[in-house]
Image: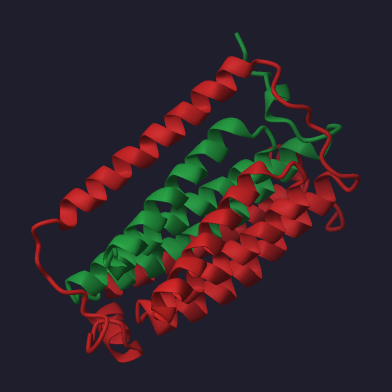
Chain colours: A green, B red
Amino acid sequence: MIGATEFYLTISALLFAIGAGGMLLRRNPLVMFMSIELMLNGVNLAFLTFARLWDNPDGDIFTFLVLTVAAAEAVVGLAIIISIFRPRQGVDVDEIDEMKG
Amino acid sequence: MIEAGALFLLGAVVVGSALGVVIVPNAVYSVLFLIVNLLGLAVCFLLLNAVFLAAAQVLIYAGAIIVLFLFAITLLSPGGEHISADPRRWQRNVGIVISVVLGLLLLFLLFGSITGLGTPLPNSGATSGTVEGFGRALFQRFLFPFEITSFVLLVALIGAVIYGSNTLDDIRRGRLPRGEQ
């Protein structure tokens, strides 16, 4: 029987690893972006778990800041992705090779 | 016992939907799995006594960001994604190995950081998760980061408008955007 702390930390580590795997494996930029969101959420969960473990609100504040920065990042990242892939057919990051030497 | 079962079910939903985001080939279904994942995480936040953050999670992530993702997907590939599997199989295997190793390392690290601590999880009677404690911390000790956050949001807004307006080259050449000439 594992405690609640271990449970949340396990979920957090699994989320981060799954997000990293998606970032490495997928070639659709939007899915890669979602994988980044998964990783951020795993980190948020770890922050909150440790904040409760030590009864300290700093983890809550950091989670809040991560949430806001993730929103800003989603806006700018999706704008960049759209401006790159809009003139093309299909979305595949392997086709973005203009800077190849 | 029922509580432990419900907790396990919650964990299964969160991890399973995260796997769904990564595995499902169609990006729209990935977004739907992401919604399930974010809502499950909001439930986790609630169980961790972070009421305000759970509400913010539902509003910002499951609301605003998901809508942005769906908008981008329908704009970019309205007919669905047609990306074949990567022909280089060894890259995929290396990626899987790297993520598994990363997960094991993280588990090792996180569990190592709490063993021997002996602190009981103050899920009952903790005061740090209340809205009042959160607000006090945010507006007293963390006021400056909070203001920086507003600046970050403003910059992101301006950047998104410039990128999305399709007139970046015009602005760079000193011409006015279309419609203002």
Query: Which quarter shows the C terminus of chain A?
Result: top right
Q: Can residue A37 be seen by looking at this rendering?
A: yes
Determine the residue located farthest toward the top in the rendered image. A101
Determine the residue located farthest toward the front in the rendered image. B1
Residue B115: where, in percent of width, then height?
Answer: 14, 56
- Where B23 falls versus A47 (above or below)? above
Q: Which residue is drawn at 86% across and 54% down?
A: B181
Quarter location, residue B146: bottom left
Residue B129: where, in percent of width, then height?
Answer: 30, 82
Determine the residue located farthest toward the right in the rendered image. B79
- Where A44 falls versus B163 (above or below)? below
Residue A48: where, in percent of width, then height?
Answer: 32, 68
- Left or right position of B173 against A62: right
Of residues A24 and A58, the one drawn nearer to the viewer in this rendering: A24
- Where B157 falls versus B20 (above or below)? below
Q: Can residue B155 be seen by looking at this rendering?
A: no
Q: Residue at x 68, y 29 (%)?
A: A93
